[in-house]
Amino acid sequence: MEKLNVVFGTAGHIDHGKTTLLKGLTGIDADRLIQEKELGITIDIGFAPWITPEVNMGFVDVPGHEKYVKNMVVGVSGIDGVLLVVAADEGIMPQTIEHVDICSMLEIKNIVVAITKIDLVERTTVNKRIEDVSLFLSQYDFNVVDFVPVSGITLEGFEKLRNALLKMAKLVRRDDRGIPRLYVDRVFKLKGIGIVVTGTTIDGKFKVGDELEILPLDKRCKVRNIQVYEKNVKEAFSGQRTALNISGVDYSSLKRGVCLTLPDIFEPFQILNVKIRCSVNHKKGIKDGHKIHFYAGTFHSVGKVYFPDGKNFLDRGEETVAQIRLEDEVFSLPCDRFIIRQYSPEITIGGGKILEINSRKLRKKELKRKENILFKLDKCGLKDFVKHELENGIHTLGYLVKKIGRDKDKIISVLDKLVDDGVVGILNYQDKVFYVNKKYIEEIFSHIEELLKNSGEGGIKKENLQKKLKLYDNLMFSIILDLLFRKKIAFKRNNVIFHFDFYREEKGVENEKMDKYEEFVFKRGLEGISPKEFEKKFGREGGEIFQILISRGKIIAVNRDFFISSRVFENLVRKIKEEFGRSGEFSVGDFKDLTGLTRKRAIPLLELLDRKGVTLRFGNVRRIRL
């Protein structure tokens, strides 16, 4: 049976015995700072492991003083369950309430309640505390695993507490997104070892030798060694407290809040769309444009929160969609939780769930129009997120991974199903594969046709058409134009887009020019030509007709700077089958000998043959498909 990996966090008011409780459970004093030892209170987060035959259990000890609640928020990010500590002699206190509120807004479901200091009070008082806490927790959506009266002095109740924690560990259900992330909570240097960063591995796994990206710093590092609960390991898995010994980065640039993940997948941002709830304990509510402290993972920034049109105030316990604009770049993913605190004085006022990352600034009316769509994303179903991203766009797999934050294999599985269902189509553009919602493309084609027909012989300037369509993404607009030309819905002349009906009215003259230019490209053979070179020879009009020849399939793109006649390509396919048909395969060298081409020209043509389904690559050998 595979061993469980879980991380639990403490919660509770100052001096209610959280650190003492952990020391009794693990034998480790989680207070590590000299100031903490001198004052006798926890100031920053501390850590202690409890290893059993069934479970690797890491504990994050958090401060209970109101002055250090911001450190508590950092500590409970990414935990799987809460050990709520309430002292029998005092009962529920202000930070008991605030800590529980924070855990609720972070959607931490499972909780074990330890009633401490039972050696100081009568049994009737202990029972009263259990009743009070039970009633208090009933207003939240927690699964209370057990109430355990304990004493840090006599150690009464510790065996029952251990059993309750093991029971809570077995209830943990983690949604592993497949791509490793670690939000740094500590950075330090060790003599003879170098830089060490610690945190909880959120998803996936880290391996010794991994090259990682540090966001939002846009820096790289390499993993030299990994420790999990003070033991050297080759890999660290989701749900483990992890220490990474890294190299290749300047120590002074590292700080709490940065995230280590795989390189070239994600990017930081400052604007995010969220579902937000005002704390039931914040009587003043939240105003539109409210200045806030924003906490996600171990990251912190100052920002402002904006509500949809018609929403100027969020009352206690109420929720809505909103846009948060931050002063600093952050890296987080959809479905991650966050906490917001009032700018001054700093008190917890709300929290919620991230729904969209890397958004552009939305006007209040735009946000209102997106309200229902965003609320649907609250369920965080992968299929819903994929469909949402493709609802109004054409995107690569890499883009979907970046925006949704799931392993590419999981997204491919969803895409394959959507393609099979006829919802999503696949298209190629400039040697890249794009996915598109078929309904979206049909609607936009219909809209463009209507615009072009209404424009008559005058057509529409390319930039004006883009504005009318409100397509702010230049790549997406280029892909749509390419599809329009290929499907003979439209054509372009002198940077003006016309409906193809108008082109057919002049087809006699145009066809003569088409034949002339296509013949020129045909005579270039496999050497081909680039669009820039063609336009240089034949002028602007030639460049426009070159694009029409592409849209009509007369010229084929080998890559963005290398085009050949479709007749030349057909002759090449025929020649390959005649020469290598018997053996069924050939090498790069064989292809060069057959065509007389250099490697610079041969390799792109071989890749084109693969894309067109003529050949299938196996290492350095191509096999001819039947």
Image: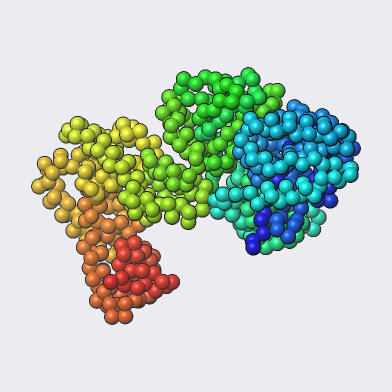
State the residue at coordinates (60%, 49%): 173
Q: Is residue 186 visible?
A: no
Q: Quadrant of residue 468?
A: top left
Q: Quadrant of the C terminus?
A: bottom left
Q: Is residue 290 left or right of residue 187?
A: left
Give the camera-side residue of 154 and 57: 154
Which scheme is used to colour this image of the protein? Answer: rainbow
Number of numbered discs present? 0
Q: Is residue 118 above or below residue 235?
A: above
* 312 vs 300: above or below: above
| Residue 470 position in % (x across, y down) | 35, 33
* Residue sitting at x 42%, y 50%: 396
Q: For this rendering, which residue is in front, 601 or 315?
A: 315
Residue 68 image point, x, y percent: 76, 33
Q: Quadrant of the N terminus?
A: bottom right
Q: Please tell me which residue lies in front, 397 or 432.
A: 397
- Residue 298 in the image: state x and y as whole percent: 66, 41
Residue 375 lies, in percent from the top left, at 47, 34
